[in-house]
Image (spheres, rainbow, N blue to C red):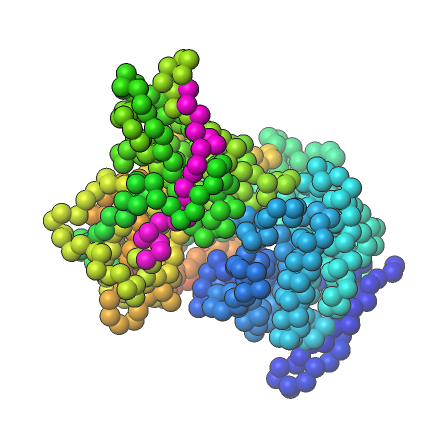
């Protein structure tokens, strides 16, 4: 069997020397130091956390059984303006990979530089979007910029000695991302672009393999890989390449106003295990492997969605395989794991108020007199594209025009607006006359171009002479995925603005002279920054702090919560806007967006293919209420500052800072296994609320006794666990005693415990 041989240097840190090894891959696996390795990788995206959080995140990943960490590279963050780079703080990807190496893990560098990742504009900087530059296709301007950035990242990685060929942790690198799913509409230029990506990447000479995700026609030597919920039917396009499952989607992204998605651990385990089997075409499938030592390993799969099956393997024995599960058999004679019998601990996090009492607030109105008077910074005789105009410098763009009314008989009219924005606030003659949101915002559609379009209608009162129309268009992130997603219009571009007097009299203002202003005055003044020189705008009148008022800034101070527990700010009561702590952005908030009250269940059947409507939760609650405040954002001594910009109207008096603690722990394990329970932060298990060995029913927090149980279940668990930070429970009849035999051949242990706070 032919293999690709890659020279690797592994630094022996204790000896301070490096020795050359080979890393190969063939159709069966990656081969590192002459041994086939199963790479179990997890994603930690470095800019989605602070650099102070990296070591602990990596540590937990390793403790969870991973041997590799992968991350994208975020072009828009590293080059927000052309040739102006930023690799500081949590953008220091070199430091991030060195932390990975320090933990003894491998690294996977997914350069892209298109990444998707539910990240604004797919990670591409907005300055790329300009006339004549088509993105992700055979366009010379785009390819030139992409090559310059890719080369810069590669050179920085080489300078940091990050590639395995230099003794670093990176064993795999990726170019582009999921292009095969959207390539069709690009035609032949898309094929040429894909081939160019491969050639450009190989020419970087990094000494480790390159991969392309979801690219069935990836040219050699690219390794094409699978992303998805299931990859059991995936086959590499080259029989010499290993099968790689680069993204196992553990659920879906949250959507404002939607119920939360949930994918069960059993289904995740099933998808991983089934990916190592042959393409499962029948309900029961046996895949057998044998190593050079003659040891056998069998994967016994049941693809059925309802019926458990007993498989007879002759002299190797009979095995019960639950529906929608895979059993792993050591030497094909002993079950060592089944995906439907996941033994795991569940942590239930609760929040505790940092201190009693209310925060003391100052406030300031967003200054809008200039825009209500129709005064902008530039003009155009057309409705502009919001993303092109703001270049992602703000979520907000003002569109302003005026219309002269000379007929005294015209008292009222209908203001009708067609927009491709996500939100629109309309002012007519300096008065707010309406606020509207797209269907996408109300969770009626997944994010996509046309779903951001909507119509706005409202009745306005006319006056003789000049009537000023001021429209504030707002976005909640830009399209990040799909064919030619960069061309999706944003804002009023492609829409219209009309005044409808009656059926026969329509004043079309679409091509009028429009004034524009990018962003908010408060943003320009950096009111979110405690060091802003415009601190005199804040009104310190606690008894007169306005609520339910649009376009309002709020500010308060607070002491850092003690201890090491995670800190969150509870924004319950606020409407929609943006939050900052000590000038650091916490992100957009929208707790007034409530998920539908129906459609959630207390139980979730893991069996059968995952879909977006399966196992939903968080019904009737805000899409997001608590926002993490990294402790590195906080001052150890002195006052911290929280600033909120409220767009639609909210009440800051219920806002509070809270510590997050895992007070409740639950465990569920099958017979003849070991259940591990542990509390976080050095806490000990203080109480066992429920324990049953038999056929317990329900879920964490709502366990109940089944048809039978070992009568001393709770006292046995109390003796083994109470007063300890962690405990191991052997789930066997010898520990819990004989129980009534039933139709269920395998007993379970369910435990619900409390950690001392």
Q: Residue at x 53, y 68 (%)?
A: 87
Residue 710 percent coordinates (x, y): 42, 45
Looking at the image, is 415 positioned above or below residue 542? above
Residue nearer the viewer, 553 or 297 = 553
Residue projecting furthest to the right: 1
**Residue 136 is a magenta residue:** no
Residue projecting furthest to the top: 503
Give the quadrant of residue 596.
top left
Looking at the image, is 181 positioned above or below residue 294? above
Looking at the image, is 723 positioned above or below residue 606? below
Q: Residue at x 57, y 60 (%)?
A: 82
Q: Which residues are magenta?
A: 506-525
Residue nearer the viewer, 439 or 306 = 439
Q: Residue at x 26, y 61 (%)?
A: 534
Tell whether 620 sits left or right of 381: left
Tell whether 571 sits left or right of 423: left
Residue 525 visible? The answer is: yes
**Residue 508 is a magenta residue:** yes
Residue 705 percent coordinates (x, y): 39, 39
Residue 66 percent coordinates (x, y): 59, 61
Residue nearer the viewer, 68 or 719 = 68
- The quarter in which the N terminus is drawn is bottom right
- The quarter in which the C terminus is drawn is bottom left
Q: Residue at x 15, y 56 (%)?
A: 540
Residue nearer the viewer, 623 or 150 = 150
Residue projecting furthest to the front: 406
Residue 447 visible? The answer is: no
In this rendering, the count of numbered labels is 0
Residue 184 percent coordinates (x, y): 72, 38
């Amino acid at each position: 069997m032919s293999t690709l041989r890659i020279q690797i240097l592994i630094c022996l840190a204790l000896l301070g020397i490096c020795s050359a090894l080979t890393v190969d891959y063939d159709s069966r696996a990656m081969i590192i130091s002459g041994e086939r390795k199963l790479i179990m990788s997890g994603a930690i995206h470095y800019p989605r956390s602070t650099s102070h959080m990296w070591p602990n995140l990596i540590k937990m990943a390793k403790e969870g059984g991973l041997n590799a960490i992968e991350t994208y590279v975020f072009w828009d963050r590293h080059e927000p303006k052309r040739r102006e780079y930023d690799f500081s703080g949590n953008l220091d990807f070199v430091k991030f990979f060195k932390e990975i190496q320090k933990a003894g893990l491998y690294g996977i560098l997914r350069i892209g530089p298109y990444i998707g990742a539910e990240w604004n504009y797919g990670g591409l900087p907005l300055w790329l979007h300009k006339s004549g530059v088509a993105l992700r296709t055979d366009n010379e301007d785009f390819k030139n910029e992409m090559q310059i950035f890719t080369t810069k990242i590669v050179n920085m990685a080489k300078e940091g000695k990050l590639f395995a060929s230099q003794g670093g942790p990176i064993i795999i690198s990726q170019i582009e991302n999921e292009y095969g799913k959207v390539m069709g509409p690009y035609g032949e230029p898309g094929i040429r672009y894909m081939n160019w990506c491969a050639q450009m990447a190989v020419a970087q000479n990094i000494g480790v393999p390159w991969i392309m995700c979801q690219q069935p026609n990836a040219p050699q030597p690219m390794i094409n890989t699978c992303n998805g919920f299931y990859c059991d039917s995936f086959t590499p396009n080259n029989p010499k390449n290993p099968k790689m499952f680069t993204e196992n989607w553990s659920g879906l992204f949250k959507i404002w106003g939607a119920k939360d998605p949930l994918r069960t651990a059993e289904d995740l385990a099933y998808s991983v295990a089934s990916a190592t089997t042959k393409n499962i075409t029948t309900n029961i499938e046996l895949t057998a492997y044998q190593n050079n030592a003659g040891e056998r390993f069998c994967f016994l799969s049941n693809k059925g969605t309802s019926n458990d099956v007993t498989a007879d393997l002759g002299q190797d024995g009979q095995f019960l395989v639950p529906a929608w599960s895979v059993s792993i058999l050591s030497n094909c004679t002993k079950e060592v794991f089944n995906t439907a019998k996941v033994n795991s601990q569940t942590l239930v996090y609760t929040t505790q108020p940092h201190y009693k009492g209310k925060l003391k607030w100052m406030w300031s109105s967003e200054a809008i007199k200039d825009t209500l008077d129709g005064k902008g910074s530039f003009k155009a005789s057309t409705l502009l594209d919001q993303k092109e105009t703001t270049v992602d410098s703000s979520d907000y763009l003002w569109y302003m025009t005026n219309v002269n009314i000379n007929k005294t008989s015209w008292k009222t009219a209908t203001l009708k607006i067609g927009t491709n924005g996500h939100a629109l606030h309309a002012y007519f003659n300096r008065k707010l006359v309406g606020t509207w949101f797209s269907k996408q915002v109300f969770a009626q559609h997944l994010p996509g171009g046309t779903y951001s379009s909507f119509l706005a209608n409202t009745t306005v009162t006319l006056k003789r002479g000049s009537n000023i129309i001021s429209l504030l268009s707002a976005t909640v992130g830009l399209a990040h995925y799909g064919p030619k997603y960069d061309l999706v219009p944003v804002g009023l571009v492609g829409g219209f603005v009309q005044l409808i007097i009656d059926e026969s009299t329509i004043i079309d203002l679409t091509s009028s002279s429009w004034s524009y202003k990018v962003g908010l005055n408060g943003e320009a003044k950096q009111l979110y920054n405690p060091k802003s020189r415009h601190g005199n705008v804040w009104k310190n009148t606690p008894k007169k702090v306005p609520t339910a008022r649009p376009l309002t800034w709020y500010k308060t101070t607070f002491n850092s919560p003690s201890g090491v527990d995670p800190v969150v700010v509870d924004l319950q009561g606020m409407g929609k806007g943006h939050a900052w702590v000590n000038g650091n952005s916490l992100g957009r908030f929208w707790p007034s967006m409530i998920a539908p009250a129906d459609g959630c269940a207390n139980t979730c059947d893991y069996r059968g293919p995952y879909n977006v409507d399966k196992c939903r939760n968080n019904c009737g609650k805000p899409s997001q209420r608590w926002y993490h405040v990294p402790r590195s954002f906080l001052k150890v001594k002195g006052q911290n500052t929280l600033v909120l910009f409220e767009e639609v109207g909210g009440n800051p008096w219920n806002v509070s800072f809270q510590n997050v603690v895992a007070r409740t722990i639950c465990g569920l394990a099958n017979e003849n296994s070991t259940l591990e329970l542990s509390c976080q932060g050095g806490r000990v298990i203080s109480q066992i609320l429920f324990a049953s060995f038999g056929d317990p029913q329900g879920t964490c927090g709502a366990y109940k006794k089944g048809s039978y149980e070992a009568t001393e279940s709770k006292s046995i668990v109390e003796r083994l666990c109470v007063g300890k930070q962690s405990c191991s429970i052997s789930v066997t009849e010898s520990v819990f005693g004989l129980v009534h035999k039933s139709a269920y051949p395998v007993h379970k242990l369910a435990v619900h415990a409390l950690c001392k706070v």
